[in-house]
Image (cartoon, coloured by chain):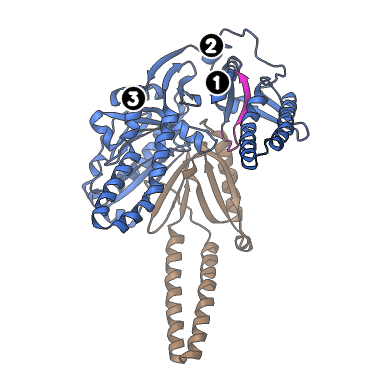
């Protein structure tokens, strides 16, 4: 698509985009401006405020310019090298072999200026991600492709210095997304609180007041979640490219992510109660080594925010590169004492590549762990489970948010046998190509 | 886990002595204090009752610690390490050697006095940290070196 550069891989030192200091200090300056204007109105002396502004604006521009001047990056010796800092020099070396993912992020203002930020995730690092902020859009994509082609398989290298060919698989319609989010958990919380409120109001006004005080923060949090989901998952697109699945989403901040093929640790298919009659599900994945803060973990979770079950199944098959076994093995009757409602949904399935477990009564979940990604297997058995001859099987994976799967309340001898069988199968699966 | 053919190794008995000793101290201090107060306020018979209750409690704690100690076990299989523990809540972990990211040997001040050390295995999954407490220091080091060597030989990518 972007045939803008036929330049070879950048082994020379490069600078960031000259407009990056403007964008970076932009937020800071807007904050200052707000304070100054507000103070000015309060004290009716705009002059003093302007004076402060007259000092701060050039100061931040100069410091931004200096930091831009001393920041440079290049790709050399199998590393992405980023030098920055004038007095406190910092040299960051990111080994490309350990690169987990490369995201291109476009903040709102960046979109107007044509600037993007490149964020790198490294395996086994809890460090904050390395980032290049900011590059021009084309340059950002070029760097991303170069990094991925250097880190990845030969196929990726062939697609080379250009943006890999992408094929759009799905685009979630905005209406469906918003309806699905409104039918989710926060709405249920809101509705049940509303009903509870009406019921209490009928009994006593004071009690209703008390309930409002309790309910209000909960409602605010639910509302916030709804808004955040919409902001993050709006315009959700899934495309297939040489290096894996490409996700693009976001209303204000466009974010694009790559789910590298073969790095998926856990997949979860969730179906909340109110989605059931529409046949919708949500697919979440966890890729190893995604560090970053809570926000980013949230962002990596959805592979597909909402889709019909059949379609979701196809996408999961595609990301795992193989059809999945169907969970079919039920739990013993004695499990009814511990999971009376959920018992019939507790199913387990297994083949040479995957372990699949379903659970959940109101919110139905199906968890998938590729056998080759199992980090360890565990069985746990509580005192009641032991009376009933039951045990729980856990398969741990390296995901940060989805930490593997557990199959609850299965027959204890079955779990013991599974521990052995799964270790053997997992070893065989690791040896597979 | 099929037990057949597995050579389960237990923890060092010094750990049981250490834990029993710590429990004795933890119970003795409030026990003696209560006994003395009861002696002053009520009389020798009641104080004797307090002492008996404290001793019974200590006996119970000893029994629990003993069962817990015996429930611990680990077995080195060809391709993975199996760790089991727990009396009320039983757990068994199977960690493939190739999945170990690193192995720690740790020893607290009490451990060191008795020549004990713990081996902690870390994999890339947060849930699968396997800890074997209270091994003789030499055994802990042997295990660490063996695990590290096996892990190196069978390292698998994520």
Q: Magenta residues, as a range?
A: A123-136
Question: Mark 1 vs mark 3: which is more N-terminal?
Answer: 1
Report which quarter residue A5 is drawn in.
Answer: top right
Q: Residue furthest front?
A: A44
Q: Secondary structure at mark 1?
A: helix
Which of label 1 and label 2 is nearer to you?
1
Question: Mark 1 vs mark 2: which is more N-terminal?
Answer: 1
Query: Does residue A428 appear anywhere in the picture?
Result: no
Please give the name of the residue rendered at 32% of the width and 39% of the height, measured from the top-left corner. A187
Q: Which residue is mark 2?
A: A159
10 Å neighbourhood of mark 3: few (<14), some, or many (≥20)?
Answer: few
> Looking at the colours in the rendered structure, which chain would you say is drawn in blue?
A
Please give the name of the residue rendered at 45% of the width and 51% of the height, measured from the top-left corner. B8
Task: Name the foreground residue: B53 vs A173.
Answer: A173
Q: Which residue is mark 3?
A: A175
> Looking at the colours in the rendered structure, which chain would you say is drawn in brown?
B
Q: Are marks 3 and 2 on the same chain?
A: yes
- Taking A20 as reference, is B44 left or right? left
């Amino acid at each position: 698509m972007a045939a803008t550069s036929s330049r070879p891989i950048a082994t020379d030192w490069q600078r960031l985009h000259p407009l990056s200091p403007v964008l970076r200090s932009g937020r800071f300056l807007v904050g200052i401006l707000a304070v100054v204007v507000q103070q000015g109105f309060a004290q009716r002396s705009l002059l003093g405020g302007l004076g402060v502004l007259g000092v701060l604006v050039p100061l931040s521009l100069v410091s931004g310019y200096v930091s831009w001047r001393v920041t440079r990056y290049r790709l050399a010796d199998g590393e992405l090298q980023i030098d920055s800092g004038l007095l406190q020099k910092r040299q960051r070396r990111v080994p490309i072999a350990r690169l987990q993912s490369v995201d291109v992020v476009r903040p709102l203002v960046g979109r107007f200026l044509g600037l993007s930020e490149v964020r790198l995730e490294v395996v086994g690092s809890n460090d904050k991600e390395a980032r290049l902020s900011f590059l021009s859009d084309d340059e950002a994509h070029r760097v991303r492709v170069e990094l991925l082609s250097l880190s990845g398989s030969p196929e990726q290298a062939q697609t080379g210095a250009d943006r890999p060919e992408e094929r759009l698989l799905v685009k979630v319609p905005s209406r469906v997304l918003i309806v699905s989010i409104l039918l989710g958990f926060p709405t249920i919380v809101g509705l049940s609180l509303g009903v509870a409120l009406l019921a209490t109001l009928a009994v006593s006004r004071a009690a209703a007041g008390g309930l409002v005080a309790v309910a209000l923060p909960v409602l605010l949090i639910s509302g916030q979640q709804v808004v955040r989901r919409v902001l993050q998952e709006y315009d959700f697109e899934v495309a297939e490219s040489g290096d894996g699945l490409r996700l693009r989403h976001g209303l204000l901040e466009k974010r694009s992510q790559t789910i590298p093929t073969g790095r998926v640790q856990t997949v979860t298919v969730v179906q909340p109660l109110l989605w059931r009659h529409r046949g919708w599900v949500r697919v979440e994945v966890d890729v190893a080594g995604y560090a970053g803060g809570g926000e980013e973990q949230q962002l990596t979770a959805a592979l597909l925010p909402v889709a019909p079950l059949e379609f979701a199944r196809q996408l999961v098959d595609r990301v795992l590169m193989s059809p999945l076994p169907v969970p079919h093995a039920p739990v013993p009757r004695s499990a009814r004492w511990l999971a009376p409602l959920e018992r019939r949904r507790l199913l387990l399935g297994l083949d040479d590549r995957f372990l699949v477990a379903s659970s959940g009564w109101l919110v139905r979940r199906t968890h998938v762990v590729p056998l080759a990604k199992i980090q360890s297997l565990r069985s746990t058995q509580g005192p009641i489970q032991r009376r009933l001859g039951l045990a729980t099987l856990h398969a741990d994976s390296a995901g940060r948010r989805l930490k593997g799967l557990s199959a609850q309340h299965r027959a204890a001898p079955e779990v013991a046998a599974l521990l052995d069988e799964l270790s053997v199968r997992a070893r065989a699966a690791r040896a597979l190509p | 886990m099929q037990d057949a053919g597995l050579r389960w190794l237990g923890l060092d008995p010094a750990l049981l002595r250490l834990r029993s000793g710590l429990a004795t101290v933890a119970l003795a201090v409030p026990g003696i204090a209560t006994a003395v107060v009861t002696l002053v306020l009520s009389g020798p018979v009641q104080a004797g009752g307090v002492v008996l209750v404290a001793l019974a409690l200590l006996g119970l704690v000893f029994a629990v610690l003993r069962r817990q100690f015996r429930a611990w076990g680990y077995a080195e299989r060809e391709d993975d390490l199996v760790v089991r523990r727990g009396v009320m809540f039983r757990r068994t972990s199977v960690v493939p050697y190739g999945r170990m990211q690193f192995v720690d040997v740790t020893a607290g001040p009490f451990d060191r006095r008795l020549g004990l050390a713990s081996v902690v295995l870390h994999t890339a999954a947060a849930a699968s940290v396997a800890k074997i407490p209270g091994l003789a220091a030499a055994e802990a080091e042997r295990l660490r070196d063996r695990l590290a060597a096996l892990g190196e030989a069978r390292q698998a990518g994520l």
